[in-house]
Image (cartoon, coloured by chain):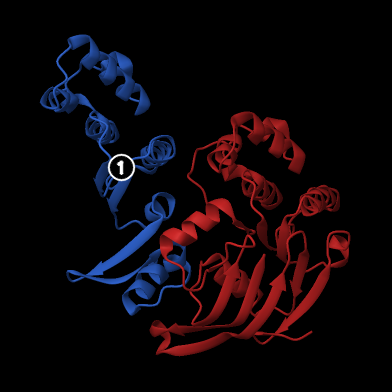
């Protein structure tokens, strides 16, 4: 709630209402809304982070390896959540990921970086189907399918 | 609706010591609104690459891809990424044999996410012939044919004046295929243009206006 306090939300009731909206939107158990997050699983903590980031309805969300370290079932749920956020709100997302599957699901456009430089850019499906740069070709040909 | 002029595409594979494949060697074609043009030809003749270039899943090396609607043409070969995304939402759809979606989302939700209401999604799934008890099931366990039906329903979720079909009915049994072709025929009469790669052209005869054959990256006839 500190994010909302910092943004000037002062009414306790409004704070609680928005917090429980976010808890529900990110599919966290409502009955644990007041629990200490250190007791949460990795996937739940990841979703708490998404909920926190969305609290003040920012126009852009930065996601750094949003699904890494999560087991695949939790990963699928988080991906579904992020897709819904994309479809239902107008929030822009800048995602950093190594996982080509995650990228394919989330990103419209893709930049491939190597040694501090962008080596290739394009539509996500275009880059994954028709990679041109040697490094992008290596990445795409190395993915498990 | 669509005019392709001298389209060329070559793949350069760095991992195979710079091996070059000349896949499209100057393709010209035109599809009018409400017309269905079928492309046939042997495997490896460049049919799928042609559709991919038009959808901009592959970047052509030269030539142009003029996409309507009339009065508002844009060259997809040179368009920016955002312009291409916008045209994919409003103008051109691609249906392939492959389904690529977020896991654990039910079929009807996937259709709705492609751009229609929840009720419309169910109606579309009924129309393409996906059994009702599968509407809320994620497609992980679907057969190849059921996946294709879902793909078609997703492509129909939003009205688009041009649909690219890459073997879109290949895994369907004859009766389902017939049902899908009837839907396509109806869309065609409503003004939708189709550019389709079909293997089994006779089965699609009611829908087809013209057939061209590709050989070695060119339109042969």
Q: Quadrant of residue B200?
A: bottom right
| Residue B100 percent coordinates (x, y) | 53, 52
Instruction: Identify the residue at horizontal 42%, vertical 63% (top origin).
Output: B81
Q: Quadrant of the N terminus of chain B?
A: bottom right
Q: Quadrant of residue B194?
A: bottom right
Would residue A145 be seen by someone viewing this image from the given angle?
no
Task: Work out whether residue B6 or residue A145 is closer to the camera in this orientation and state it.
Answer: B6
Whether residue A15 sits left or right of residue B159 in the image: it is left
Q: Is residue B120 above or below residue A114?
A: above
Q: Residue furthest top?
A: A13
Numbered circles on residues, count: 1
The blue-tinted chain is A
Whether residue B50 sits left or right of residue B12 in the image: it is right
Q: Residue furthest front?
A: B71
Whether residue A76 sits left or right of residue A8 in the image: it is right
Q: Is residue A140 above or below residue B132?
A: below
Q: Residues within 10 Å of mark 1 (few under 14, many from 20)?
A: some
Q: Quadrant of the C terminus of chain B?
A: bottom right
| Residue B116 percent coordinates (x, y) | 59, 37
Instruction: Identify the residue at horizontal 27%, vertical 19% (top origin).
Output: A18
The red-tinted chain is B
Q: What residue does disc 1 label?
A: A70
Circle 1 chain: A
Would residue B212 be seen by someone viewing this image from the given angle?
yes
Task: Work out whether residue B23 or residue B103 is closer to the camera in this orientation and state it.
Answer: B23
In what element is the residue under mark 1? loop
| Residue B177 percent coordinates (x, y) | 81, 52
Whether residue B56 sits left or right of residue A10 in the image: it is right
Instruction: Identify the residue at horizontal 46%, vertical 66% (top origin).
Output: A126
| Residue A110 percent coordinates (x, y) | 35, 61
Task: Work out whether residue A37 or residue A21 is closer to the camera in this orientation and state it.
Answer: A21
């Amino acid at each position: 709630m500190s994010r909302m306090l910092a943004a000037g939300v002062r009414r306790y009731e409004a704070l609680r209402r928005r917090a429980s909206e976010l808890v529900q939107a990110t599919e966290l158990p409502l009955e644990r809304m007041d629990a200490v997050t250190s007791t949460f699983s990795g996937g739940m903590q990841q979703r708490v982070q998404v909920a926190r980031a969305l609290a003040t309805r920012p126009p852009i969300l930065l996601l750094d390896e949003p699904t890494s370290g999560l087991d695949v079932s939790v990963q699928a749920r988080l991906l579904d959540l992020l897709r819904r956020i994309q479809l239902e709100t107008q929030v822009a997302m800048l995602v950093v990921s190594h996982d080509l599957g995650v990228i394919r699901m989330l990103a419209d456009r893709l930049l491939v970086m190597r040694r501090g430089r962008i080596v290739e850019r394009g539509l996500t499906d275009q880059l994954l189907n028709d990679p041109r740069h040697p490094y992008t070709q290596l990445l795409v040909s190395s993915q498990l399918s | 609706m669509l005019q392709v002029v001298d389209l060329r595409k070559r793949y350069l594979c760095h991992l195979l010591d710079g091996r070059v494949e000349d896949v499209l060697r100057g393709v010209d074609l035109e599809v009018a609104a409400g017309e269905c043009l079928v492309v046939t030809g042997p495997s490896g003749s460049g049919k799928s690459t042609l559709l991919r270039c038009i959808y901009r899943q592959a970047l052509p090396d030269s030539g142009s891809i003029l996409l309507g609607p009339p009065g508002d043409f844009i060259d997809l070969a040179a368009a920016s990424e955002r312009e291409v995304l916008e045209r994919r939402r409003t103008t051109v759809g691609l249906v392939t044999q492959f389904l690529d979606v977020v896991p654990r989302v039910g079929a009807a939700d996937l259709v709705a996410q492609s751009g229609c209401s929840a009720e419309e999604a169910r109606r579309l799934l009924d129309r393409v012939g996906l059994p009702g008890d599968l509407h809320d099931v994620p497609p992980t366990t679907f057969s190849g044919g059921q996946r294709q039906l879902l793909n078609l329903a997703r492509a129909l979720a939003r009205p688009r004046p041009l649909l690219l079909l890459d073997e879109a009915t290949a895994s369907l049994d004859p009766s389902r295929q017939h049902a899908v072709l009837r839907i396509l025929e109806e869309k065609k009469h409503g003004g939708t243009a189709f550019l389709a790669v079909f293997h089994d052209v006779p089965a699609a005869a009611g829908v087809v206006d013209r057939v061209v054959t590709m050989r070695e990256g060119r339109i042969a006839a």
